[in-house]
Structures are given as structure tokens and as C-alpha cells.
Amino acid sequence: IFGADDQTLEGVVLEKLAKTGGTLSIKDAATGGEVLRRLLAVFDGRYYLEGSLDFHYGSPKGEDLDGAGEASDIRIRINSMAPSEGKLKIFEVSIQGKGKEKVVKIPLGGAKGEVETRLAVIAIDQLRKWLDDVSVKAP
């Protein structure tokens, strides 16, 4: 459970992000920008949101998420990788910032639009969980 009544997952994440006072950067090579679109749909301008689409379908292993950045910056990267032994494609959600990093591998299958939507919701929920795990200071 992430909220009640009229709360949305995106709205809850934006509330948590507003308390960090940092920058959110999104590199999305797997959902065609769905994560950024979903966040922008409820964005109210209380913090700085930076987004770009990265269509390089490589693995982020060993790569920094676009440089060191400030300690308060939060970077999320969503990549796609080759299918596993089965038919499911593997997606990787990496979240980094505030001295912490989390990488989650998610096997998904289905129609392209359906997978993009499901992956976007999973990525935003992973960001919510990550924000719950880091200590945040109110500005």
C-alpha cells in the first residue's frame, strides 16, 4: 500500500522527492519515456526534474549514471537486456544517490505497450521504496 483515497503512486513519489531538495535525473532506455511522462503528469514544480531518453540498449554494469553528481542528486536508469533462458526479456532498474544504490532485475514479457506500462509502474514503485530506505531532509 503506497497511499489512500485519491493518492497515486506518482504523486506519492513526487511528495517524497520534494522533501529531498535534490535533482532527479531519469535515463530511460526501456519504456520510451513512460516513467518521465507519468511523473510529469502530476508534477507541480516544487523541485527540479531533469529527464532524457537514452536509447542505448547496453548494460549499465560498471557505468556511473552520468557522472558523479551531487550527493543530493537521485539518478534512475531503466535498461533492457537480452532475454533470459526463457522468453522473458530482462529489464534493469538502477537507482543511485544519497550514498546508496539499488539495482533490481525484472523479467517481463508481453506486448510492447503493455510491458512499457508495467515496467514504468515497477520502476516508479522501486523509486518509492528506495526513497523510503534513504533518510531525507526537508528543505
Image: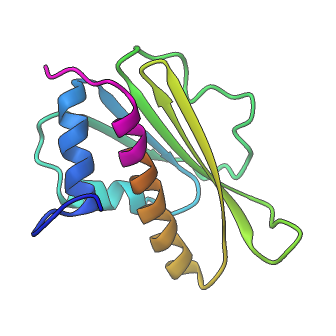
Hey, which residue is sitting farthest front in the picture?
1
State the residue in front, 2 or 92: 2
Magenta span? 128-139
Would you say 31 lies left or right of 91 here?
Answer: left
Residue 79 colored in magenta in the image: no
Query: What kind of colouring is applied to the model shown?
Result: rainbow
Vertical placement of residue 129 versus 117, above or below: above
The number of callouts visible is 0
Please tell me whether residue 108 is drawn above or below residue 120 in the rendered image.
below
In the displayed image of the protein, which residue is found farthest to the bottom? 111
Image quadrant containing the C terminus: top left
Position of residue 8 measured from the top left corner of the image (x, y, whole percent)? 21, 63
Residue lying at the far right in this picture: please name it. Answer: 85
| Above or below, comparing residue 68 to residue 107 in the picture | above
Quadrant of the snapshot with the N terminus: bottom left
Q: Is residue 101 above or below residue 54?
A: above
- What residue is shown at x 15% (from left), y 64% (from top)? 4
Q: Quadrant of residue 87?
A: bottom right
Task: Tell me where residue 138 appears, x and y as whole percent.
Answer: 15, 23
Residue at the (50%, 24%) spot, across then down: 100
Residue at x 42% of width, y 20% of height = 98
- Residue 64, given in percent of the width and then of the height, sits at 62, 25
Q: Is residue 49 left or right of residue 125?
A: left
Q: Quadrant of residue 70?
A: top left
Q: Camera-side residue: 15 or 62? A: 15
Q: Position of residue 93 (x, y in %)?
A: 57, 48
Q: Residue at x 38, y 24 (%)?
A: 73
